[in-house]
Image: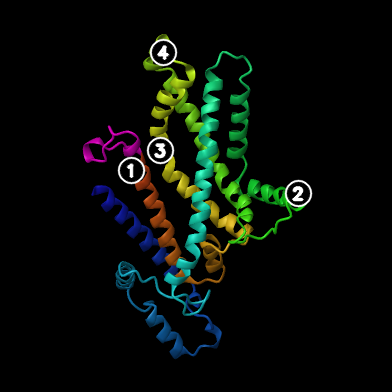
Amino acid sequence: MQRLIRSAVTLVVVIAVVFGLLRQMPIEGYFNNYDKMTPTQIRVGLERHGLNRPYLRALMSFLGNLLKGDLGVSNRYRVGYPINSLIAQKMPISMSIGILALITALALGLPLGVLMARSAISAKRFKAADKAGSAFIAIVESIPFAVYCLFIQIYGTELIRKYIYLPMLFSKENIATWFLPVFSLSLANMAMYAMWMRRYMIDEYSREYTRLARAKGVSEAAISTKHVFRNAIVPLSQYLPTSLVVTLMGSLYVESRYSIPGMGGLLVDSIKRQDNTLVLALVVVYTALSIAGVFIGDIAMAVLDPRIRLTRSQEAR
């Protein structure tokens, strides 16, 4: 319950700050044809948007509508169109790409981390897998997200033109056009999962129970999969909220690069067109998704390790 209250308070604070900042923006962002409007039309429009009311009254009115599920209407992106309907059209695409990116990061990052950990503790001198994996992590972590996404798009699309003959622009119906956006979004999380899985597995390999298992003749493969990996995955689950936030923020850039008709492109367009009402609604949605990611991380830790309880006396985070 305390986590719910803290999350609700966080959401309200973010809404209050963004709501206040947008009220300081030029009022043109609330009208489509501001230059052609009469003073009376402007006054009526300001009253309709609550801009003539005191800040607290306007904020409470917005929060009341939000609780009813009403995010208002677009003023400039698509004049008079309900924002709920806009989000309903765009969100499935963004969620599909984001979920695929997270699955890809888990499917490739975790095995890479396991391989790096086993290579690091091996008796071999060169430890090729660990060095190669460390180089990959260093490259992804050191190069800005926008730079390597642009690199992937330029050379990835050239490769596609040469060998696969696919259209470059994103298409919902053509699943092959999802590959480059999903791969671009997954790289940062892939490197993070590999880095932390390697660290936690090496920590687990140094514990007493692994030495005892070796003394009993248990194979290294069994120790890695049945004991070390299962214990290392529990603390790793706390990074799930970070993964979600990284994916959400990355989608803003990736969707605009590949002309994906999703939430990221919608937010960028609404900012360019100064559609303040739509910007505020999208900030609310992104903030709510980020907070939901924290809950998912907490639940994942509790599911993976039954000893963890999400109670006040045993909070781990």
- Residue 224 position within the rendered picture, expressed as x and y whole percent measured from the top left: 46, 23
Q: CA distance from mark 1 to mark 3?
A: 9 Å
Q: Secondary structure at mark 4?
A: helix
Q: Amino acid at mark 4?
A: Arg
Judge whether 289 appears above or below 74 on screen. above
Q: Secondary structure at mark 3?
A: helix
- Rendered image: mark on residue 299: 1
Q: Please rate how many residues cluster around mark 4, counting C-alpha atoms within 10 Å: few if below 14, some from 14 to 19, many from 20.
A: some
Start-end of magenta stretch: 301-317
Q: Residue lying at the far left in this picture: please name it.
A: 313
Q: Is residue 164 left or right of residue 277?
A: right
Q: Amino acid at mark 1?
A: Ile
The foreground one among 267 and 47 is 267
- Residue 248 position within the rendered picture, expressed as x and y whole percent measured from the top left: 49, 53
Q: CA distance from mark 4 to mark 2?
A: 50 Å
Q: CA distance from mark 3 to mark 4?
A: 25 Å
Q: CA distance from mark 3 to mark 2?
A: 38 Å
- Residue 53 position within the rendered picture, expressed as x and y whole percent measured from the top left: 33, 77
The foreground one among 282 and 275 is 282
